[in-house]
Amino acid sequence: MPQVIFLPHDELCPGGEVIEAEPGKSILDLALLHGIELEHACEKSCACTTCHVIVREGFESLSESDELEDDMLDKAWGLEPESRLGCQALLADEDLVVEFPRYTINIVSENH
């Protein structure tokens, strides 16, 4: 079973987190399942960028992004070549290292 390493983030997971992951789950679902309250203002419908993550290791193993996700990512704060929307990026069988950007474009936290 692959491991997902969430790097430390001051608000979301100050100490970082290492999680055994089941292939096929989204990065967002995995984070939420383990108490990491990553924003998801559109309720996982690929209509915002609040669950934007940067995959530092294992990026190529994720499910491919589609045109809708790519268009949404163009609006994300701090976009990098390894950026994905957490609600759309599905795990495969390789380990991942995931970083949460410092900011989102969401002005008001939805407190999910």
Image: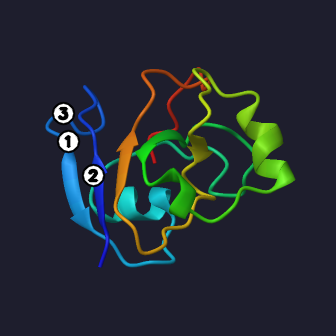
Horizontal side of 102 relative to 107 (left or right) equals left
- Mark 2: which amino acid? Ile
For this rendering, which residue is in front, 5 or 13?
5
Residue on which the image places disc 2: 5
Q: In this view, does 93 lie above or below 67?
A: below
Mark 3 surroundings within 10 Å by alpha-carbon count, few (fewer than 14), some (14 through 19), many (20 or more): few
- Mark 3: which amino acid? Pro
- Mark 1: which amino acid? Gly
Foreground: disc 1 or disc 2? 2
Rendered location of residue 68, percent (x, y): 84, 50
**Contact (CB < 8 A) between labels 3 and 1?**
yes
Horizontal side of 28 relative to 47 (left or right) equals left
Question: What element does badge 1 sit on?
Answer: loop
Q: Is residue 31 above or below residue 12?
A: below
Q: How far separated are the C-alphas under marks 1 and 2?
A: 7 Å
Question: What element does badge 2 sit on?
Answer: strand
Sequence-wise, the earlier of marks 1 and 2 is 2
Residue sitting at x 80%, y 57%: 66
For this rendering, which residue is in front, 56 or 42?
56
User: Tag on residue 36?
Assistant: none
Sequence-wise, the earlier of marks 3 and 2 is 2
Rendered location of residue 96, percent (x, y): 37, 55
Q: How far separated are the C-alphas under marks 3 and 2?
A: 13 Å
Q: How far separated are the C-alphas under marks 3 and 1?
A: 6 Å
Mark 1 surroundings within 10 Å by alpha-carbon count, few (fewer than 14), some (14 through 19), many (20 or more): some
Foreground: disc 3 or disc 1? 1
Residue on which the image places disc 1: 16
Residue sitting at x 54%, y 43%: 51
User: Tag on residue 14?
Assistant: 3
